[in-house]
Amino acid sequence: MKTKNRCPWTQDKALENEYHDTEWGVPLHDDDKLFEYMLLDAFQAGLSWSTILNKRENFRKAFDGFDVQKISNYKEDKIRELLNDKGIIRNKLKIRSSVTNAQLFIKVQEEFGNFDTYIWQFVNHKTITNKWERMEDAPVSTPESDAMSKDLKKRGFKFVGTTICYAFMQAAGMVNDHLVSCFRYKEV
């Protein structure tokens, strides 16, 4: 049985393979999922994506299914509950930023009609298709992620540095960073 040629960052682990094969790099235009990715990418700062994937379902449960409206209304009792939840990353700044970012996400939706229209403007509303042969060829930031980070920060978003923004762009299919040798490269 022939194995699929994937991007090597999956390390051929089942959870990473599933995420790589079904989500990573697929152009995403659903505000609910865009918020989920934004929240998870903020928690990834300084950690491996594998750590976040392994805790994703715990995050989903702890953060009310990533419901942006509910998260935007979290009060101190909920924040304390999250800080005591061993199933997630218990970083006070990241947890508090989730509430702030949810509130700001809603403001962006109100201004632009949806978050999708706002966020995809940084790539002129179409996926940038790269042609990397090795993972180390892919950058950790680009002028587009720089612009996204700068604008999000200006709006008050937290944990949205250019590297986090680029990881978000990769996940949301704003850039296709699958290696050209990867079976998903042409599919997305």
Image: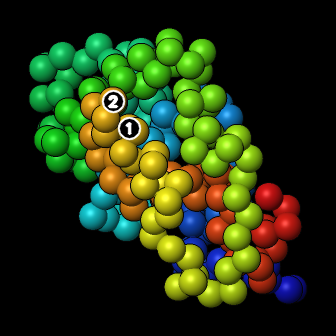
Circle 1 residue:
152
Whole-percent x, y for residue 24 in the image: 64, 57
Q: Is residue 83 above or below residue 24?
A: above
Marks counted in the figure total 2
Whole-percent x, y for residue 142 in the image: 50, 64
Density class for disc 2 (Cα within 10 Å; few <14, some 14-19, many ≥20) is: some
Q: Is residue 27 above or below residue 84?
A: below
Res. 22 image quadrant: bottom right
Determine which of the numbered discs, if any, sits on residue 155 in the image: 2
Given the image, on which type of amino acid does mark 1 rest?
Answer: Leu
Q: Secondary structure at mark 1?
A: helix
Res. 78 image quadrant: top left
Whole-percent x, y for residue 104 in the image: 36, 23
Nearer the observer, 152 or 181: 152
Q: Is residue 117 above or below residue 138?
A: above
Nearer the observer, 134 or 183: 134
Density class for disc 1 (Cα within 10 Å; few <14, some 14-19, many ≥20) is: many
Whole-percent x, y for residue 100 in the image: 27, 27
